[in-house]
Image (tube, helix red, strand yellow):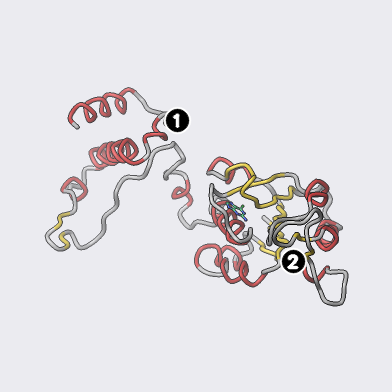
Amino acid sequence: MKYNILTLFPDMIKQGLNSSIIGKAQEKKLINIETINIRDYALNKHKQVDDYPYGGGAGMVMQPEPIYEAYKEITKNSSKKPRVIYLTPQGKKFDQTMALELSKEEELIFLCGHYEGVDERVIEMVVTDEVSIGDYILTGGELAVMVMIDAISRLIPNVLSNETSAETETFDDNLLEYPQYTRPAVFMNRQVPDILLSGHHKNINMWRRQQSLIRTYNKRPDLLEKANLDEIDTKFLDKYCKKK
Ligand code: 6GU
């Protein structure tokens, strides 16, 4: 996967994605993160990339030319046109389903806006997808891109060392994960649940499934409607709800 990011703050993105699993994935060439500084494509000698909004009002608007020139530079060697994702609170809400869909692309371009926005014409001309990471306003798209690249990259084969770990986890089946414990078996008078020390894998799996159901019911009941529950799950939840 090749990620191209059009931004005014390339260092923020490079530093933010250089550590841990995403850093390793870059070293192993499983992903390639290229940042393009929009300012390098400024037309004037002051390297200005924004200007006052036509019609008046507060703030500054990013000008279309530097963004368009930067976009042309990235795509000049691409055989097929990559999707161009504009990060904006007005976009479609990013979720695990979108992360999985995007992880199957070969190349993606991200456009990070700043100031009060980006000139509408260049958005119309180059952007294929508008995406938001949630209902709140960020100062720019950089943190949003980092969130997306993290979530997408861990779904790319071999990025996670244990391949199954991306498969049996939260949101995959719309259930939250069961609680995890490690040594010591007693911490400040709190015992690890006995069943986990029993070595009885069938019972452990059943307990974990039940914990997932309980957690989802208590913390994210909205997810339960989308979850794929079998008869055993439903019976267990019914019983649990009556006890509560
Ligand atoms: Cl993608 N960009 C900005 N600037 N703010 C946001 C956002 C994106 N998603 C939520 N807030």
Left or right: residue 23 compared with residue 7: left
Q: What x and y, as percent, mark residue 103?
A: 62, 48
Relative depth, front residue between 94 and 138: 138
Dot 2 falls on a residue whose secondary structure is: strand
Where residue 42 sits, quadrant-wise, is: bottom right
Relative depth, front residue between 215 and 205: 215
Residue placed farthest to the front in the image?
56
Q: What x and y, as percent, mark residue 113?
A: 69, 58
Judge the density around disc 1: few (<14), some (14-19), many (≥20) Cα neighbours within 10 Å. Answer: few
Residue at horizontal 45 percent and vertical 41 percent from the top:
171
Q: CA distance from mark 1 to mark 2?
A: 40 Å
Residue at horizontal 34 percent and vertical 41 percent from the top:
219
Dot 1 falls on a residue whose secondary structure is: loop
Locate the C terminus and report the quarter of the image it occupies. Answer: top left
Judge the density around disc 2: few (<14), some (14-19), many (≥20) Cα neighbours within 10 Å. Answer: many
Identify whether 10 is placed above or below 146: below
Identify whether 230 is placed above or below 213: above
Relative depth, front residue between 208 and 139: 139
Q: Which residue is mark 2?
A: 36
Residue placed farthest to the left in the image?
189
Q: Which residue is mark 1?
A: 226
Q: Earlier in the sequence, mark 1 or mark 2?
A: 2
Residue at horizontal 71 percent and vertical 56 percent from the top:
117
- Name the amino acid type tagged 1: Lys
- Name the amino acid type tagged 2: Ile
Q: What x and y, as percent, mark residue 175?
A: 39, 38
